[in-house]
Structure formats: C-alpha cells, structure tokens
Amino acid sequence: MLQLTPAQSEQIERLQLKRDTASLVQLLGQAWPDVAEQLQARWPAFVDAALERAHQLGLKEVADQARYASLCCLWGASFETKPRFEWAAALCADPALNRALLLHQLHHRSREDLVRRAARAEPTQQALTPAGFDKAMAAVETGLAHITRGRTIYVDQPPAPPPKACDLGAITFAVAEPKPLQAYQGQDGAWRRTDLTSWAPPPETLSAPLDEARVLPVLSRAVGAGASARLQLAVSTLAACDAHHPEVLHVSAAGRLTWRGADTAKLSLTLHAPPAPPADPKLGPAGIAHGEPPDLQTVSIASCGIRDAGAPLGQVQLGLQVHAATQHLVKVRHGALPTEVWPTEGAPAAPTTALTACQLEADSQAQAAPSWLKAWQGLQPLARTGLDKLFAAWSRQMADTSGRLEAELSPLVGQAGITWGWQHEHDGAVALRVQGAIDFAALVLDLRLAGELAWGASRARVSLRAQGRSVWRMTLDQRGAAAADGQGLAQAKCSWRHPFALGVEAMATGDPALLSAGPMPEALRGAVIGECGLRPRPDGRGQQWFYRLSIEPVHVLLLRQDPLGGTQRQRRELLPASTLIDWSAG
C-alpha cells in the first residue's frame, strides 16, 4: 500500500489548484465582468493570487476557493490583511471557526457592509449594490455546479450548497426527580422508612459552547417500578437550515429517540433507571452494599453550527448517570447452641432454627433470598459438625474409649441490620450510602476435653480447656468510599484467638513409672482461632457474611519418671490443625 508524505500531498494539492485556476478564471470572469474588464491582462494573475491565498487559509475545496475569490473581487486580493478589514483578519484567525463557518461569516459581513453603503450612497453613484452582489454570487454557484458535475463520476450527486445559517440560540434544562424518595433509617433498634431530602437543582441555560463534558447524576426508577425522573429541556434557535434542525437525540439502554424542528422547543424526557438483573441461581440476589451501575444516557442537541457572527453553539451533549433509587435492607437474627456432651447417647438433637432469621427488603417490599436464609440456618449444624470432628480427632489420641468433650460453641449470636442504596450528596453527586448496626457475640466458647494417655503401663489423666467470648459490635456508616474510622465496610471484621490450657495428672496403675507434663513453647500449646465479618463476594457483586473457626495444633511433652530408668521424654500431638467452620452467606 502506497502512502504519500505530507510534502507529496502538498504538491498534489498545488497541482490541483493550478488545474482549477483555468476553469475558475473563466467562471469568475462571467460572474464579475466589471472586475475582469478593469484588470484586463492582469485578471488571470489576480484570480491565481486569490486562489493561492484561499489555499493558505485552509480552503481546500474548489467551491470554497471560488467563494473566497469572489470576496476578493469585491474587496481586493488578500483583503483580510489590509486596513479597514480588521474584522476579516479576526475571523480568519479565530480557531473556533471551521472553514465553512469562516466563509459564511465573511460573506455575511460583506453583504451587511454593502447594505450600509447602499443606504448612505447618492442615487447617482455607481457602486455594487446588495442585489448585484447576490447576483454575482448566484452566478458563481451555478458555474460551480457545472464544474463539479463535469468532474464527478456520480452525475446525479449535486455539489454541496453554500452554508446557510443554522445554530442554537440557548438550551435550558433541569432534572426533576420523582418525589418522595425514601431510605431506611435506624431508630430505637428498628428500621423505618423516611423521606430523603429532595434534590431539585435550578434550571440551567447554556448559550455558549461547553468547556468540558457535562454529566448529570440522577436518581430514578426502572420501568414499571413507579414514577421516573425527567429531563425538562427547552431549545431556542438563532436560525435553522430546514426541518432537520435543531435535532434532539436521547440515547439510553432502552434505545434511541429523536425530535426535530419545532418539536424540540419544549421536551420532557423520561429517564428510566436500569432494571435489576435476575438473581444468581446459586448466590441469590446481589450482595450487601452492591449498587448496580448506572445507565449512562446522553442527550445531544445538534445544529449545523453556522451563525452569521460569533462562535457557534453548534452541538451540545449532556451526559446522564441514571442510578436506581432503590434502597435495600437486610436483617439477620441468630441464636445460640446449647451445651453438648460427647460421646452422645442415641441420635444427637438437631439444632433449632427457631431463632434464625434472614430477611431482605427493597423499598419495603420483601425480596426472595432462600439461599441466604438457608445459609444462616446451616451455621449451627456446621458448628455441630465441627465439634463432631474435634471429638473424633481427640478420641484417636486417648487410651481406649476415655475421650470426653463438653462444649458450648455458638457462632454469631445476636442480630444485625444493614441498609444500602444510591443517594445524593450535599453537592448533588450520587454515592452509594451504606449504614448498619451489627451486634453479635462472634463466638461464645467453652471447650472442655478430657481423657487418658497411656505410655506403656503408665497412665495419666489429661484435660484441655479453651474458653472466651468475642464480641463483634459496630456501626456502619459509609458513603461512596468515605467512612469515619472504624465505620467502613473494610473494617467490618472481627478476629480472635483463645489458647488452650493443659492439665496432666498421673494415675496409679501399679507401675512405678509416673507420667507428667513438661514445659512447651507457646507455638505448640494450641488455640481456637477464627475470624468473621463481611468480605467481597466471588462474583464481585457486593459483600457477603463469612465465618471461619479453626484449631491450632495442640502438643504435650510427656515426662515418664521411672525410679530405675530415669526420666524419659515424649512429645505427642493431642489435636491436629483443623478447620471446624468455613461458612458464608449472601
């Protein structure tokens, strides 16, 4: 594939300009016969200089070059560089004006000057009148049509007409959100719906191009979920080319809507929030503190961007971040397990779920979340299964069937309520607000393990005990990513470590050797460790509850004191490292 260098492209443009000169000398001579007759032999050089200057001003199309050369026939070659034409120099130097707009404003200002001169001229003076100027320009356009048609292979495609004034005068807009919008507030241990402070920004009017993109945050409702927000829009025009302009285009997830011409004078555009996606079959609805992303909508107001004087308003685009105003609430209540003893006699009693509840609401409407409730109802059975596992591991290290376990182990005893949803900040921005009250005994623990250890004919009673109570109590209050110290989602966690206390007592068996325990490093004494709280869901859609409870391995250093053989040492593992509970919900 061949690619031209900038220098080669410039050379081709100049060759094309020379080729156009011959045609335009004749065309302009017919449109401006008085100027051509006055210049006589200098006429071709005059046209060539005018076209060269047009090229320097960035006018690449032959039609634009001919229109500029016509103005030179009126005012003189390179007229914008001469005194009394400072207005033309300012227009040519304005970077806000594209070439089509530049030609239009040069043409419009020139005709205005002719009108003023005609009003001051004496009846006997011979001067070009506005009508004569219009006639000359019309002749140029007719000639350009013939030249363009002779060059193109698409004979039915007419040349582009000269630009016509078409621009916006002003745009007035305001967002009106549905009222009232409500949110959950914690009051006296209960969650009640209260009205939010309404956000009603005053109308704004744009009469100049925007320096930067304008994006409006909006709270609204989805289709069928109640009243939605609206964008009140009024468009005034300075001039319009035809019924196509002005044009208003509203683009949203629902599709595209267009209004043109007089229909754009006053509009009320519905701004629907995105609908909630279906719940995940396994995880259920979106997790705690998940805000669905907004629907990014645009409203474009367009015209040709051509006005007789000044920088055009042209096209204005308003961005809209339409968030769902839905407010969510989850309430959890969870009870304690009774103290149990192993080995059990008969079938173990099933943990009661009467004190287990998990309710999810959205704007006071109950939401189905069976997987969440099922997970909370399964936490107590998981704790019971973990204790079965612990007793089995203990019994394997005890002599005969001497292993015993008495346990009070209750995870997450208490209640919690968390609410979340998109809300306006004081400055009108929209942020995800999360509030909550968590009041749990993260762990109520009292483990008592007992049994007998044997070394040869020697025996000893051994006991292990770990006890404690870990409290997870906090207030959540987060807006967006901002939260006071200790009140953010990142701090919604609780951890603990409850060490085991070991006791070893020698037993009289008739053997002279007695068993006792020696000192052990802290790392080998073992503990009950765990963590609970909120963490991001695997799918990234909000937070979920989690709970982990584990056993650090427990060792004992046995000392066997034999009157004949002296003291012998033996290290044994009483409990291996294990996980009792690994749970999540939501």
Image (cartoon, rainbow, N blue to C red):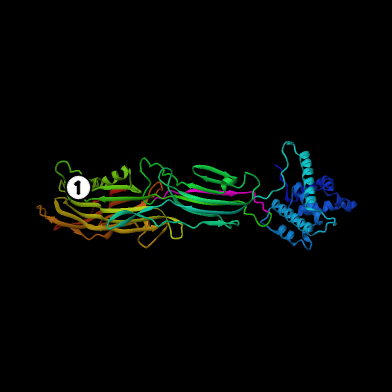
Query: Can residue 179 be seen here?
Result: yes
Where is residue 168 shown, x and y percent of the image? 61, 52
Q: Give, as a single range, the part of the protein colored magenta.
A: 290-307
Residue shown at 78%/39% (left/top)? 150
Which residue is farthest front? 123
Residue 263 % position (x, y)? 57, 45
Please indicate whether residue 225 sits to the left or right of residue 335 in the image. Answer: right
Disc 1 is placed on an element classified as helix
Q: Is residue 293 magenta?
A: yes
User: What count of labels does the image hold?
Assistant: 1
Quadrant where the N terminus is found in the figure: top right
> Could you say where residue 415 lies in the image, as x and y percent from the top left?
27, 53
* Residue at image location 79% in from the left, 42% down from the top: 147
Is 386 on the left or on the right of 140, as rendered? Answer: left
User: Which residue is under mark 1?
Assistant: 395
- Residue 17 pos. (x, y %): 79, 48
Mark 1, Cα crowd under 10 Å, few <14 / some 14-19 / many 20+, is many
Asked if one can make out residue 560 in the rendered structure from this viewpoint, the answer is: no
The stretch drawn in magenta includes residue 207: no
Closer-to-camera residue (581/94):
94
The amino acid pointed to by label 1 is Ser
Residue at the right extreme, as displayed: 41
Q: Nearer the viewer, residue 479 or 4?
A: 479
